[in-house]
């Protein structure tokens, strides 16, 4: 059981926060975890990206060059991540912000209207949770509940009123995948 | 149960220092080590400690001199260009036999270079860096947990041997986050006293902290004393980790973050039936020459992988002393070799050796 | 009342390594007298600089550290931050303080470090062989300004006290001289005041003392004292540039 996950999008979309959330949830489940913010020449034009490795065994190389799954928060990153994925990899895109269609035949492609769904829930900031819901549903790498527990522990008390909407967003992502799979 | 946390390498370094009883930090901003001063500025005052942003790298290392001479555990951190500026001060610390911990979160060079991860300060760190005959202990962690463990240990080594200790990391290690177990908090008042420190003489005879030895015999005596200390450190404190060396035909030598990538490369090679192994120096000085020499006896070739243009490879060659061919592979500028890249190099070495 | 002239307790019976006629010895004695009279010796940490006074850690009977060239204010900062109740003084020459150590002294003053600085200005690098210092006055011949300091080539001499007096953290800034007994006494008072400022926790205190260097100036000791009065004082006026109103003698 090992997932090498890359997240990418615009700066300001909460990419790094979302990656750290994944890492912390992995740690909560006592898995081996390594989170690496993008650190290289690809950090241009306001792009933001990070990688998270969640594994049942020891993590050697912390670099993710061929992710096993990826979440694209915008169009440009969807193009990049599709190229980077390893064969059989999973690409989840925020299809509210890109009309990208898959080019590669050897990957699994999921279109999730994350931003639209977040807006419907009353908070466009929770699009990342919709996408995370989709990721955990597709990969089974983490229990959805772990993500909520982490949010509870890292959000300051004054932001705890945001927990319910985040939880709903996570469930929204899960059911979006279920709908696709029927 | 030890306390667990999910931390960046830089933050973990700072937290480990506090837990080691360090209450003083003097430093100057430079990327990519900024989280260390940020963390210290936030947390040290809560422990009654002092964070002070100096006017320069040079001033910072001399504040470290003063604080260390006054008996405190003290930390400074920087990156390449800043360490160059601090080198004068590090030489003075070594000469005056003052303990201190100095973190170098390496970046690309030479000159201004860039702020990407690099291992280009290997020579600077392992050869002292400044003027005169001296060495510093150099610790090279390869995981966030090891950042914690080695930082904690660094303060002990520094005090024990009265010598500056360098923690040699890189921007990648500084920025990545991993779960860590944090060691027990040491309260400064529980640390052994330092009867040599300059704290005001009270009723005893005065203490002097200096590296000035004007008479030739005195200077020679100091140098001999230092060498004796360095020999003792070499004998007792060398740290190295090996992986699948027993039957290895091809040995990778790598340190720090590069060793993590090399580990994956060894696994890849083994899957393809190539008997590869890894030697990872944890102390870069003292360098684990005996381990290298021993491993070279049955090896067909050694590949040194670094994020520089070939620095540790010099020490590898000295240690191996012609017993096996030594090849170098490195990239700079913030580029990384992938495990596959390293495997390709092993295969090239295999071809070169077997003709 | 018997007035006795004897060695201050804070000064060890060691030989000075200064040239004949040099006034460093007087200034060091004044520092030791001040430490004695204020009962500071047991809790004092001194920081020696680089230059002619480099070996003065052999002379003061207090705990001392030796700083790299120009860095004494930074070393003293480290000491004082760890030991806020101690008395920390530094003793620097003009090459050390006004050239290579300019940044350190300015920022120690800016931070209002509670340290006492004895700044000995003899308008030249003494120990290294009489080279031009930032404080060398116009027209003064040195081994590196053999035709006399020329403003168009080497620029103007630096008035350190006036510069530091613009910094709020520098609460006591004074320039004195030791070219005659009257001024030696005034210097003593200034040095004591600079220690008192530290004891009161008021901030950074510096006494710039004009000193003679007969050897490198190429003058007899007496002529050198005259040179201080006639050449240096007109450019480096004596007096207190800043005083905390609370401090009394």
Image (cartoon, rainbow, N blue to C red):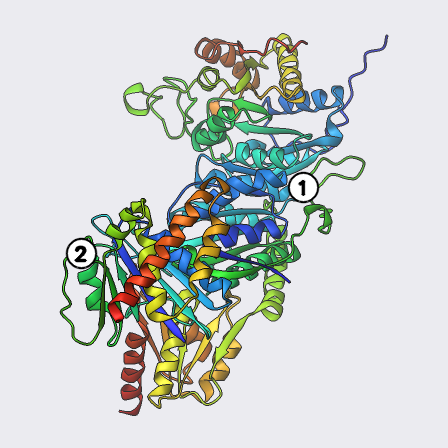
Horizontal side of B288 relative to C183 (left or right) equals: left
Q: Which residue is mark 2?
A: A76
> Which residue lies most toward the right here?
C1
Can residue C66 be seen at all in this image of the molecule?
no
Mark 2 crowdedness (10 Å alpha carbons): few <14, some 14-19, many ≥20: some
Rendered view: C94 above or below C58: above
Q: How many marks?
A: 2
Horizontal side of A123 relative to B12 (left or right) equals: left
Cα separation between marks 2 and 1: 63 Å
**Looking at the rendering, in which quadrant would you find the N terminus of chain C?**
top right
Q: Which residue is mark 1?
A: B208
- Chain identity of mark 1: B
Badge 1 marks a residue whose secondary structure is strand
Instruction: Kindly identify the residue that appears in the image at 20 percent across and 57 percent down.
Output: A95
Badge 2 marks a residue whose secondary structure is helix
Q: x%, y% of residue B170?
A: 40, 58
**Looking at the rendering, in which quadrant would you find the C terminus of chain C?**
top right
Between C4 and B94, the one lying in front of the other is B94
- Chain identity of mark 2: A
Q: x%, y% of residue A85?
A: 24, 70
Between A151 and C244, the one lying in front of the other is A151
Foreground mark, 2 or 1? 2
Instruction: Kindly identify the residue that appears in the image at 52 percent across and 36 percent down.
Output: B52
Asked if marks 2 and 1 fall on the same chain, the answer is: no
Tell me, yes or no, whether the two marked residues, 2 and 1, touch with CB atoms within 8 Å: no
Q: x%, y% of residue C134?
A: 41, 25
């Amino acid at each position: 059981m090992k997932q090498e996950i890359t997240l990418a999008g615009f700066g300001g979309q909460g990419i790094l926060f979302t990656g750290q959330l994944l890492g912390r949830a992995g740690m909560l489940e006592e898995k081996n975890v390594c989170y690496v913010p993008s650190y290289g020449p690809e950090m241009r034009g306001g792009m933001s990206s990070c990688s998270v490795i969640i594994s049942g065994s020891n993590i050697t190389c912390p670099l993710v060059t061929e992710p096993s799954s990826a979440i694209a928060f915008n169009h440009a990153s969807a193009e990049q991540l599709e190229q980077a994925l390893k064969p059989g990899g999973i690409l989840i895109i925020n299809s509210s912000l890109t009309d990208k269609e898959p080019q590669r035949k050897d990957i699994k492609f999921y279109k999730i209207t994350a931003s639209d769904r977040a807006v419907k829930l009353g908070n466009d900031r929770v699009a990342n949770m919709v996408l995370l819901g989709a990721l955990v549903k597709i990969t089974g790498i983490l229990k959805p509940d772990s993500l909520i527990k982490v949010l509870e522990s890292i959000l300051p008390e004054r932001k705890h009123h945001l927990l319910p909407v985040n939880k709903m967003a996570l469930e929204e992502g899960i059911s979006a995948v279920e709908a696709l799979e029927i | 149960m030890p306390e667990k946390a999910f931390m960046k390498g830089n933050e973990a370094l700072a937290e480990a220092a506090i837990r080691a009883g360090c209450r003083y930090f003097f430093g100057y901003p430079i990327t990519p080590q900024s989280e260390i001063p940020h963390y210290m500025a936030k947390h040290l005052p809560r422990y009654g400690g002092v964070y002070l942003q100096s006017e320069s790298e040079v001033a910072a290392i001399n504040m470290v001199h003063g604080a260390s001479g006054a008996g405190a555990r003290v930390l400074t951190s920087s990156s390449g260009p800043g360490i160059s500026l601090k080198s004068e001060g590090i030489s003075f610390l070594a000469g005056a036999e003052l303990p201190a911990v100095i973190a170098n979160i390496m970046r690309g060079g030479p000159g201004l270079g860039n702020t990407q991860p690099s291992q280009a300060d290997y020579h600077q760190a392992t050869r002292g860096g400044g003027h005169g005959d001296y060495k510093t202990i150099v610790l090279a962690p390869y995981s966030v947990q090891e950042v914690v463990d080695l930082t904690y240990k660094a303060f002990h080594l520094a005090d024990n041997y009265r010598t500056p200790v360098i923690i040699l990391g890189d921007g990648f290690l500084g920025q990545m986050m991993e779960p860590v177990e944090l060691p027990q908090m040491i309260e400064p008042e529980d640390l052994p006293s330092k009867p040599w420190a300059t704290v005001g003489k009270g009723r005893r005879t005065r203490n002097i902290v200096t590296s000035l030895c004007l008479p030739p015999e005195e200077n020679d005596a100091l140098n001999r004393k230092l060498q004796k200390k360095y020999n003792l450190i070499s004998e007792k404190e060398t740290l190295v980790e090996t992986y699948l060396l027993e039957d290895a035909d091809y040995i990778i030598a790598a340190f720090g973050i590069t060793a993590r990538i090399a580990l994956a490369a060894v696994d890849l090679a083994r899957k393809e039936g190539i008997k590869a192994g890894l030697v990872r120096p944890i102390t870069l000085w003292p360098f684990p020459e005996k381990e290298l020499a021993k491993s070279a006896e049955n090896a067909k070739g050694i590949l040194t992988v670094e994020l520089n243009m070939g620095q540790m490879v010099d020490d590898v060659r000295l240690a191996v002393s012609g017993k096996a061919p030594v090849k170098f592979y490195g990239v700079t500028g913030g580029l990384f070799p992938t495990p596959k890249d390293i495997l390709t190099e092993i295969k090239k070495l295999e071809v070169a050796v077997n003709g | 009342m018997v007035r006795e002239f004897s060695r201050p307790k804070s000064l060890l019976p060691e030989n000075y390594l200064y040239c004949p006629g040099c006034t460093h010895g007087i200034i060091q004695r004044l520092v030791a007298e001040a430490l004695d009279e204020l009962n500071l010796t047991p809790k004092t940490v001194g920081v020696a600089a680089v230059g002619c006074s480099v070996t003065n850690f052999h002379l003061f009977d207090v705990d001392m550290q030796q700083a790299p060239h120009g860095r004494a204010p930074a070393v003293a900062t480290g000491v004082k931050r760890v030991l806020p109740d101690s008395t920390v003084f530094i003793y620097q020459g003009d090459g050390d303080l006004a050239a290579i150590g300019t940044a350190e002294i300015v920022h120690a003053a800016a931070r209002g470090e509670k340290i006492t600085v004895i700044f000995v200005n003899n308008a030249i690098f003494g120990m290294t062989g009489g080279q031009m210092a930032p404080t060398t006055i116009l027209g003064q011949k040195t081994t590196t300004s053999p035709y006399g300091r020329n403003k168009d080539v080497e620029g103007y001499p630096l008035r350190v006290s006036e510069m530091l007096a613009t910094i709020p953290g520098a609460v006591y800034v004074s320039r004195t001289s030791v070219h005659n007994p009257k001024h030696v006494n005034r210097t003593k008072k200034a040095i004591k005041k600079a220690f008192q400022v530290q004891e009161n926790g008021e901030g950074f205190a510096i006494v710039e003392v004009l000193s003679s260097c007969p050897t490198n100036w190429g003058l007899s000791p007496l002529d050198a004292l005259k040179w201080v009065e006639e050449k240096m004082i007109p450019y480096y006026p004596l007096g207190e540039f800043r005083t905390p109103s609370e401090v009394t003698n």
